[in-house]
Amino acid sequence: MKQDLFQAIADPTRRAILTLIAIQALTPNAMAEKFDMSRQAVSKHIRVLQECELIKPEHSGREIYYHFNPKKMQELDNWLAQFRKMWETQFNQLDKVLSTIKNQKK
Amino acid sequence: MKNDLLFDFTVDKPAKTVFITREFDAPLSLVWDAFTKQEILDQWIAPAPYVSKTKYMNFEVGGKRFYAMVGPDGQEKWAIQKYTSISPKTNFKLYNAFADKDENPELPGSDWDYNFSEQNGITKVSITIFNESFERMERVLEGFQQGFTATLNNLEKLLAISQK
């Protein structure tokens, strides 16, 4: 599941779509126009983004508007944060060791 | 302790690459020693409550460090690092792989590239990890989950030692 999420955002066009719809929900036609892409190409990107829940469809009359799902992005952030935390822990320990050695040398 | 020291952590999943940059309030020679000398390395490399135990370490090109992260329950997670390139106080590279207690590596491993530079008494260390898989990252993390909660304890302990 995480892998899909990373694959989804690894593509620059999909990242651009996310950036755009984070500001405003868009229909597939509007996306195709903005990115100068075929409807088929847009549909493919939408499918990938929707499968990993980065975007959500919302029907409005005959149109479908796609909304950005910030919760999913948060999930990715949280997952990465654990690794960041691990390194931070090690480096904070190193800070203390370095300052101990520096003080011993004085 | 300075709080404005740079810390950056980025993951490039499609490229299977991890970038880590951190500044330290210490001269280059000391920071270099902290990364390349067994007796200093073992003091900080494992997040508490894990302890780093180096069985042997030959810091030279072609040399190895065989070590374990030892958990509070005594469980040992072994790994082997082989040094592939060393430019004193500038750069070193190693190949890292999980192993069993008999030094049999679990391949493939990952390539680690460490860069060191100093400016105005602040030393910057940049680490790039190539060919890192998510499975391996998660495995490392699993082992350290308990460590996060005990981070503060560890810091307090080290503080107490440095104040003696």
Image (cartoon, rainbow, N blue to C red):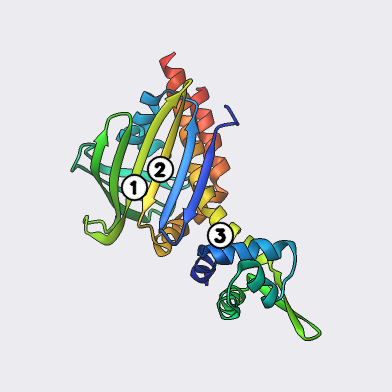
| Quadrant placement of the C terminus of chain A | top left
Cα distance between the residues tagged 3 and 2: 20 Å
Observer able to see residue B147 = no
Furthest residue in direction top, as rendered? A106
Q: Do labels 3 and 2 share a chain?
A: no
According to the picture, the residue beneath numbered tag 2 turns out to be B127
Quarter of the image where one finds residue B28: top left
Residue plotted at (48% across, 37% down): B22
Of all chains, the one bearing label 2 is B
Asked if residue B50 lies left or right of residue B149, the reply is: left
- Residue that carries the numbered disc 3 in the rendered image: A79
Q: Mark 3 lies on which chain?
A: A
Which of labels 3 and 2 is toward the front? 2
- Whole-percent x, y for residue B61 in the image: 20, 39
How far apart marks 2 and 1 lie (CA) works out to 7 Å
The residue under label 3 is which amino acid type? Trp
Residue at which label 1 appears: B112
Crowdedness of circle 2 by 10 Å Cα count: few (<14), some, many (20+)?
many
Q: Which of marks 1 and 3 is in front?
A: 1
The residues bearing labels 1 and 3 have C-alpha atoms spaced at a distance of 22 Å
- Amino acid, disc 1: Trp
